[in-house]
Image (cartoon, coloured by chain):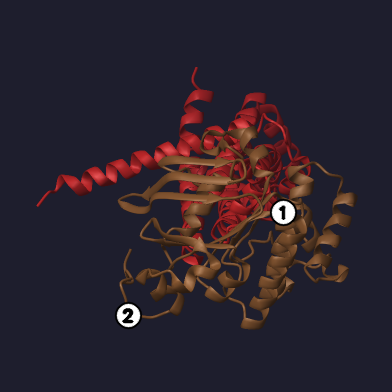
Chain colours: A red, B brown
Amino acid sequence: MNIFAPIGRAFLAMLAQIGSLTAFTVSSVSGCFRPPIYWLHILRQIMRIGYFSLPVVGLTAFFTGGVLALQIYIGGNRYGAEAIVPQIVVLGITRELGPVIAGLMVAGRVAAAIAAEIGTMRVTEQIDALTTLATNPIKYLVVPRLVAAIVSMPILVGIADSIGVFGGYIVSTESLGFSGGTYLKNTVDFVTHQDVTSGLIKAAVFGFIIALMGCYNGFHSKGGAQGVGTATTNAVVSSSILILAANYVLTSILFSK
Amino acid sequence: MAGTPKIELRGVKKRFGSKVVLDGIDLTLESGSSLVVIGGSGTGKSVTIKCVLGILRPDAGQIFVDGEDVTKLRGREREAMLRKFGMLFQASALFDSLAVWENVAFGLIQGRGMARKEARDIAIQKLAKVGLGPEVAGLSPAELSGGMQKRVGLARAIAADPEIIFFDEPTTGLDPIMADIINALIVDTVKDVGATTLSITHDMVSARKIADRIAMLYKGKIIWNGPTKDIDSSGNPYVDQFIHGRAEGPIKMEVKA
């Protein structure tokens, strides 16, 4: 009968969603600058978010660097430009693949874990219990995760960059016939300060996105086990999409001349 | 009437979307009294408590704690107000990442900034009050049975010697003997700390045991309010149906909200 009603409802629901996310972001970010700050929790979260993500991020970076070398060699071969492998590998890894691959892996690992943990706390009333114990749940739960992710991600990506270049190096010297010394010299001569820092800036932003989406979805999960499941899925999907979207925006800002 | 009531609700209304949950609640708790609110599932008992604690914000009406309108409090003022409260949650809502004693001492350490060692001693005293020995202090909540979790929840609620304690379905999910033990503990500990209490339950045995006064909530309104001894002669058909647990009567269960 009224085809506009469902459209309007969906639109209003979307606006409400944006509004609640904005409010959540504002109170979380402002919570980072107001005491009490739970330093011990921040350190513990850095361990969980950063340190324990190292194996996953390291392995993906290694194989990404390796496959990048292989593809550039095969592609470059068509123009007789195989020698450019080290330069393109280091550029691709530091500018794009390091932060993006690490961001997506950490999104899958950490955003899901955060959403599941906070979501379970929500449905078992542990978050309400925090409030009744005169503890602000945003400061106690969200701020440590947010700070830890923003601090951990650039470090993780720095390590991922090195391992990715190393992956390219191994493939190039072991199976593509590059000499190790030349490969390294070309890499170091070519890469600039800005290539690396731009990737690290991206990493910090991705860390913010991952922790924020994990916490937000966890905080707003409803119902029981199913609600937590939905929150977890939403956290991973939304953080992954936002990472890729933010990556485009950041690239166009950081490399606009 | 002896001075200002401890808690007073005036015309409190709350709705979620189009569903009216509280439709003008008026309730008064004298200092040191014990009020039990009874009512079926989904009649807004929990919502009432959450409005007083500021976890939910009422759409209309006022809530006074010690004569102060708490619906207007924000931030630090609200945290200061919450220090007067202790709450026992339906499923205990213990923090599963913390040991039993840390749960009990949480409000002392986080809410009041007490030193951990001192807080631990108090936690062990409070655990003793609810019949738990010091050997459980180091366990994780997941290692305890439901009844023991309730006891720890009770110890946490009384840890900071609150002026007001809320009990949300204190006996739900416990066997009758454990339920009676919890009821007795509630009566004893409350007498001990001299707190004002508000409980919500649909367990009439529990209500009779812990209440000075009983109020019945139905369709978002208080339909009866009187001393516990008068509950059997209320002359209210709704109350009679509820306390005798009859399927037939004026209360029709809404299957779908």
For label 2, the crowd category at 10 Å Cα-Cα, with few meaning under 14, some 14 to 19 and many 20 or more, is few
Within the image, what quadrant is residue A190 found in?
top right
In this rendered view, identify the residue nearer to me: A13 or B146: B146
Residue at numbered disc 1:
A52
Picture coordinates of residue A186, whole percent (x, y) = 68, 32
Same chain check for tags 2 and 1: no
Q: Nearer the viewer, residue A124 or A231?
A: A124
At x 53% / y 45%, what residue is drawn?
Answer: B8
Give the residue at x 45% y 49%. Answer: B26
Q: Give the structural element (helix, strand or loop) at label 2.
A: loop
**Nearest the eye: B138 or B249:** B249
Q: Is residue A51 above or below residue B71?
A: below
Disc 2 from disc 1: Cα separation = 59 Å
Question: Is residue A101 among what the camera can see?
Answer: yes
Farthest top residue?
A257
Residue A216: x %, y % from top left: 52, 46
Q: Position of residue A34 (x, y in %)?
A: 68, 30
User: Measuring 32% from the left and 69% from the top, which residue is drawn there?
Assistant: B254
The quarter holding residue B198 reads bottom right
Q: Which residue is mark 2?
A: B248
Q: Is residue A206 left or right of residue B238?
A: right
Q: Amino acid at mark 1?
A: Phe
**Whole-percent x, y for residue A208 in the image:** 59, 38
